[in-house]
Image: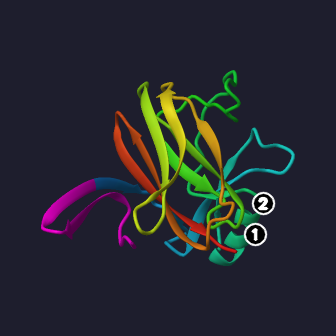
């Protein structure tokens, strides 16, 4: 699915089978990742040896693969102050908005899916394959408000292709596309 604009985009999936119809609608927040008069890409650069100081930079599309290969991610960095870490989540931050990203993406073996919610709630993070089957559940418990959770996803024996990360919280459902390359 390709969106021609950033911001909130509503997507409706309707399935008809054996005389039954089911409809599922989600709102997807597409970040504005372009800069430099729309010819460059915003990247959250994680400086080697200084991961506590991420920087939002504007790069050429040709430089993107190298940045993704060393752990940078597409889009602006999340600002915040460091909190105590618990439950083995990495880099917990105070955040002012909901976050749902994966980096690197595309990936061959592992990616880190990061999310936060502005209100304490039950959070469920699922990975779906292209047929709509749940591949795995990565998170299914209460999430603290304004805490950044980083969950590692190992593609393991999954075939190359497109998968969907689906995050459900009290604030709604968010979806990200995950590209597994081999």
Left or right, 38 with respect to 84, comes to: left
Residue 118 x %, y %: 43, 31
- Return the residue found at the far left: 19
Q: Which residue is mark 1?
A: 66
**CA–CA distance in space, label 2 to label 1:** 7 Å
Q: Residue at x 59, y 36 (%)?
A: 149
Residue 82 x %, y %: 68, 27
Residue 144 x %, y %: 51, 24
Residue 95 x %, y %: 53, 33
Q: Residue at x 17, y 69 (%)?
A: 18
SS for tag 1? helix
- Return the residue found at the far front: 18
Q: Residue at x 35, y 67 (%)?
A: 5
Q: What kind of secondary structure does the magenta stretch mostly adopt?
A: strand
Left or right, 125 with respect to 70, comes to: left
In the displayed structure, 4 sits above or below 139; it is below
In the displayed structure, 152 sits above or below 24; it is above
The verdict on residue 22 being magenta is yes
Q: Which residues are magenta?
A: 1-25
Q: Nearer the viewer, residue 163 or 52?
A: 163
Q: Quadrant of the N terminus?
A: bottom left
Instruction: Determine whether label 2 and label 1 are within 8 Å by CB.
Output: yes
* Residue 149: assigned label: none
Q: Which residue is mark 2?
A: 70
Q: Quadrant of the C terminus?
A: bottom right
């Amino acid at each position: 699915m390709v969106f021609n604009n950033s911001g909130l985009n509503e997507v409706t999936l309707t399935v008809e089978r054996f005389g039954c119809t089911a409809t599922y609608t989600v709102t997807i927040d597409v970040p504005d990742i372009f800069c430099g008069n729309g010819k460059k890409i915003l990247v959250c650069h994680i400086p080697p040896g200084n991961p506590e100081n991420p920087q939002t930079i504007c790069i050429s599309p040709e430089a993107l693969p190298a940045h993704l290969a060393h752990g940078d991610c597409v889009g602006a960095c999340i600002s915040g102050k460091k909190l105590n870490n618990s439950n083995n989540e990495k880099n917990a931050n105070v955040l002012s908005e909901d976050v749902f990203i994966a980096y690197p993406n595309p990936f061959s073996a592992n990616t880190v899916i990061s999310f936060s919610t502005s209100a304490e709630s039950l959070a469920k993070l699922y990975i779906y394959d292209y047929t709509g089957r749940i591949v795995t559940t990565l998170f299914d418990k209460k999430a603290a408000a304004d805490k950044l959770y980083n969950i590692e996803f190992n593609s393991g024996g999954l075939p190359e292709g497109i998968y969907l990360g689906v995050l459900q919280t009290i604030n709604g459902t968010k979806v990200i596309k995950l590209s597994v390359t081999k």
